[in-house]
Amino acid sequence: MILRRYGTTYKSVRPRFDSRSMTEIGFTKDGALSLDVAEFERKYDRHEGLELSPTATGTVQADVEHALLEMLTAGLAEIEDGLDAGQILVVESEPGIDHPRTRGKHGPDPETEERERTFRYSVDPPLRVGIYVSR
């Protein structure tokens, strides 16, 4: 399960990564769980922090954008699937402070002599998540 803090409450969310709004790394509340901050802090301890910052490169912009978001989705799913019983995943990146965004550059490929246009997309700052363990 993935949680994210909204004001004084932690709510369960699911990723909402859409290549049509490339700069937005969004999440949607799914209503499965809601805990106030005090209750969350009583029940869980932070075990580990991770950062996700995939990078995708290619010659077709839409494909590169889609690949980047697929990598981010797969990274979150891999972490979530690896959680043990009693563990949850919390999105720690905060809107307005260090909320991740996609960044793109394009131009000639610096690694080859070809003049073919190359698109490079990354997530910056990284998406910060924490693994929390039930007490």
Image (cartoon, rainbow, N blue to C red):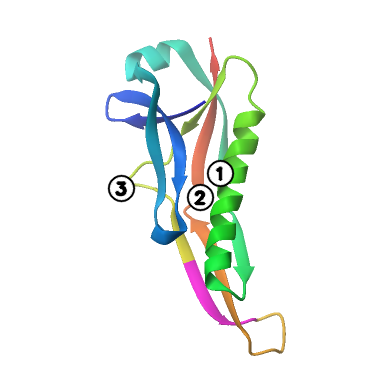
Q: Which residue is most to the left? A: 7
- Residue 106 part of the magenta-drawn span: yes
Q: Residue beneath label 3, please? A: 96
Instruction: Determine the residue positioned at 61% across, 63% down.
Output: 56
Residue 126 numbered mark, or none? 2
Could you tell me residue 86's position as x and y percent? Answer: 58, 14
Q: Mark 3 is on which residue type? A: Gly
Q: Quick one: label 2 or label 1, which is nearer the N terminus?
A: 1
Q: Which residue is mark 1?
A: 51
Give left or right: position of 8 versus 51.
left
Q: Which residues are magenta?
A: 104-109
Q: Which label was assigned to residue 79?
A: none
Q: Secondary structure at mark 2?
A: loop
Classify mark 2: residues with Cα within 10 Å, few (<14), some (14-19) or many (20+). some
Element assignment for label 3: loop
Image vertical order of residue 14 relative to residue 66, above or below: above
Give yes or no for residue 100 being in the magenta stretch: no
